[in-house]
Structures are given as structure tokens and as C-alpha cells.
Amino acid sequence: MKDFEVFRGRRAKFLTQLGGKAAIIPAASLVIHHADCEYPFRQNSDFWYLTGFDEPDAVALFLPFRPEGEKYILFVKPRDPKTEVWQGFLWGSEGAVNEFGADIAHSLDDLPNLIGHYLSGAEGIAFRIGKQSSIETLVLKTWAEQLEKSQRGEACPSEIVPPCPILHQMRLYKDEIEIKSIREATRISAEAHELARKITSPGMNERQLQGAIEGYFLQQGARGPAYGSIVAGGDNACILHYTANNSILRDGDLLLIDAGCSLMDYYNGDITRTFPINGKFTSEQKALYEIVLEAQENAIKAATPRNSAEVVHYSALKILVEGLVDLGLLRGNVESLIEQDAYRHIYMHRTGHWLGLDVHDVGAYRLGEYPLELNAGMVLTVEPGLYISDRLEIPKGQPEIHERWKGIGIRIEDDILVTQEKPEVLTKLALKSVDQMEY
Ligand code: GLY
Ligand code: MN
Ligand code: MN
């Protein structure tokens, strides 16, 4: 396997940070779509990050307290021609050792018998409770048996703790291989947005564009969309998680597209662009678009070491609220409007999130009461928007909204790599200036 060393390096770091604890990290299982048909397999991101192993139901044990050659154990589906003829090739325990670097590998069938043996000597167990019931039952049963034995004087793990604080702190900082993959995912995603804008015209159905975008992802070798693509004409853009994508695009409306691909190694792009379906902004659309773009550019500039995601958010929010006051869509002092959340009927989400193996990637945003400082190697989205509809109540003291503004939903979203110098916009191939959105 070509990235063998990368996964080995991550495991070494994880093992060191576990101290005397054992970690149990299960793979994902297949999920039923309907009847006996399953969704395409999606590996658990923590499991993938440590193993690079892409089969369902496997279980990885990390045992830092054991001697060299017994610290990384994989339990995998056994090779079986009858299964493989239906479900495809399986690596089996031999492949798990030879191709994926396990110290020892066993068939999953042996897990119930062997797990107690491997956990003995652990000071504690790092295992995420509440996610996968079958393995959780086994872990708790094994621990309960060891607690029983401890009453007869044997040592046993004293606690079960989540592995997330260690793993997710590691995942927050992207290594070079991850950054390379995210660059690839963002390139393909940005090119798909360019393609979609160029073929858009009034009278098309939203899903024709969805097809073009997702088709491009596949043509480029990606696994598919990273999340349900949002292709939202006009007022549909004011529904934040609109994925029905089944309306006709109307002359005079804007089109909001939020789409990104997921690569075969699960790294993702996440881009939103908004543009006029007929190639010309109306004056209301343009006024709002310019505010969102300025807010976004201001927020991107703030994505530098020692600032936080919170500073990025407020850098966008301040410009959005100032712009809305200038247009008469909000009334009052900008600072007080922000303090009182009086803009929430027009801007109801945060300005971004970490991006990586998960689209809404793991990693803390705060350390206790302090916002986490950004640092080189972190990747986040910056995605301010304005959504003008009459779905939400207007806060007391704020102006009614004139019909001419309604049905305008705008978001602009880029993926940003924090560096020691200027933030790098990974998605810059997807154009966004006012002139570039018009034809
Ligand atoms: N597409 C999901 C998001 O932008 O967060
Ligand atoms: Mn998005
Ligand atoms: Mn996003």
C-alpha cells in the first residue's frame, strides 16, 4: 500500500498518546437502504485515519502496553470464496498483516474469544460508547468479566474513556498527505461548480445541474458527492438543507449550488456559489451578493494563526450586519444587533467548520472557555450567507421586509488552509466576483 508509512506514523503517535490504555476502534458497518439493498459503504473516519483499511465491520486494537509486534491488532472478515463472489474481494488476516501493517490479524469470528486476552494489562479502555451496539456489548461484557476477576486481585482496566480527545486533536492538524488529498477534492469540486455555472439557463431543472456536477465528480475519479448536493433556485436557497433539487430554474432568480466531492480516500471539498440564472443580477440581488462577498473576503483574511474560528465568524458577521443596516433590512446599532442576535432571521448559521475526512470535521472549537487558536495545517470553510424569506418571525423592533427582497438566498463558501503566511483559498478555481458571475 503506497501510504503505508503515513498510517504507521499516525498509529505510532496514537499509541504513544494512549499511555497505558488500550484503544478499540471499530470500522463502520454497511447500512440498509431498503429491503436487502445497502447504501454504498462508507468507512468510519477514525478507523480509516489509523488503518487505511476499507472493509466493513473490522475492529482495530491498539495496545501500547504490550511488547513490540503485538501493539496493533486487526480483526477482519475472513477470506471466503462464497462471500467474495457476491460482495467482492476481502483482504483476510494475511492481507491485513502484509498490506496494512497489522502486527497480528485474526478473523472477526475470533474477536469474542480473544478480546479479553488482548485487553488484559490495560490501565483503561479508550472506546466510543453509544455508536455501535454489537461491539459495545462485547466490550462491556469483557470489561465486566475483568472487573469480576479484579475482586480476586487481578489487575483490570479502571475506566472506559472516549478516544476522541486524542484522535480528533490529531485529525484537526492535517498532514501533507491529507492536504494533498484535500487539494485534489477541492480542485474537482471547484471545476464542477465552473462547469455547472456555464451550462445553467432558465427553464432547466435543478437536478440536471446536480447530474452534471455529480457526473463530473465520478468522471474525475472521486467516490461521489461528499454530502447531499444542494442545487437551489430562487427561494429554495433559503432552505438551508434543500436537497430535493427538483424545481425549474426561473429567469430572474438566483441559483445557489452547495456541492463538493468525496475522494476514494474520503477527503472532501465543500463549496457554495450563487449566481444569476439568466446571467444578470437584479439590483437587489447584486446589493446582497456584494455584502456576502465582502463579508466572506474579510473573514478569509482573518483565518490566520492566533485568530480563532470565532474571530473568522465575527469578521463576516460584522460586514453582513453593517450591510443589512445600510440597505434598511435591519435597524439599529451594529454591535447591539449582533449582541441581541437580531439578524438571525436573515443569517441563521455559523460562518464555517473544520473540513477533512468528515465534511463537518472533528476537532474542538473551544478549549474550555477559550476559543481554539487557528494554526498552520488546519482546514476550515468560510461560508457566510444571507437568506431573505418570510419563514422566520422578524424580531421586535426590526423592519418588515419588502417583497422585492424576498426569495433571495445567497451563500459563498470556500475551503481555506491556514498557513503561517496568508490563508490559502483551496477553492479559488471556482470564480466568485460579481463580474465573473454575470455573462
Ligand atoms: N454543505 C454543508 C456545509 O456547507 O456545511
Ligand atoms: Mn457547503
Ligand atoms: Mn460547509
Image (tube, rainbow, N blue to C red):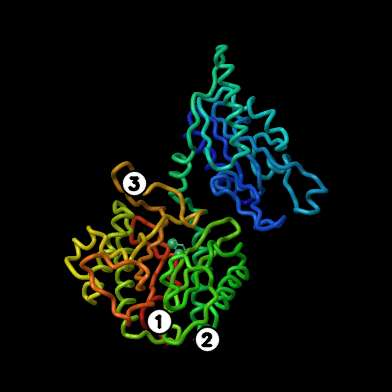
Q: Which residue is mark 3?
A: 366
Under 8 Å from ligand 1: the CB of mark 3?
A: no
Q: Quadrant of the C terminus?
A: bottom left
Q: Which is closer to the viewer, label 2 or label 3? A: 2
Q: Marks 2 and 1, how far apart in space?
A: 22 Å
**Is residue 154 rendered to the left or right of residue 294?**
right
* Between marks 2 and 1 in the image, the one whose residue lies nearer the viewer: 2
On screen, residue 318 versus residue 80, left or right, reads: left
The residue type indicated by label 2 comes to: Gly
Is 252 located above or below residue 376 in the figure? below
Q: Earlier in the sequence, mark 2 or mark 1?
A: 2
Residue contact between numbered discs 2 and 3, judged by CB atoms under 8 Å: no
Q: How far is disc 2 from disc 3 in space, using C-alphas?
A: 46 Å
Classify mark 3: helix, strand or loop: strand
For residue 146, what is the image quadrant?
top right
Residue under the image location 45 percent in, 87 percent down: 251
| Residue 417 lies in quadrant | bottom left
What amino acid is labelled 3 in the image? Arg
Callout 1, which amino acid? Gln
Q: Earlier in the sequence, mark 3 or mark 1?
A: 3
Residue indicated by mark 1: 436
Instruction: Identify whether 283 is placed above or below 141.
Output: below
Who is closer to the viewer here, 80 or 401? 401
Vertical relation: 20 (above or below) 358:
above
Residue named by callout 2: 203
Element at label 2? loop
The answer to whether residue 142 is visible is yes
Q: x, y (%) of residue 114?
A: 67, 28
Q: Which mark is residue 70?
A: none
Residue 323: tell me if it is visible.
no
User: Quick one: label 2 or label 3, which is nearer the N terminus?
Assistant: 2
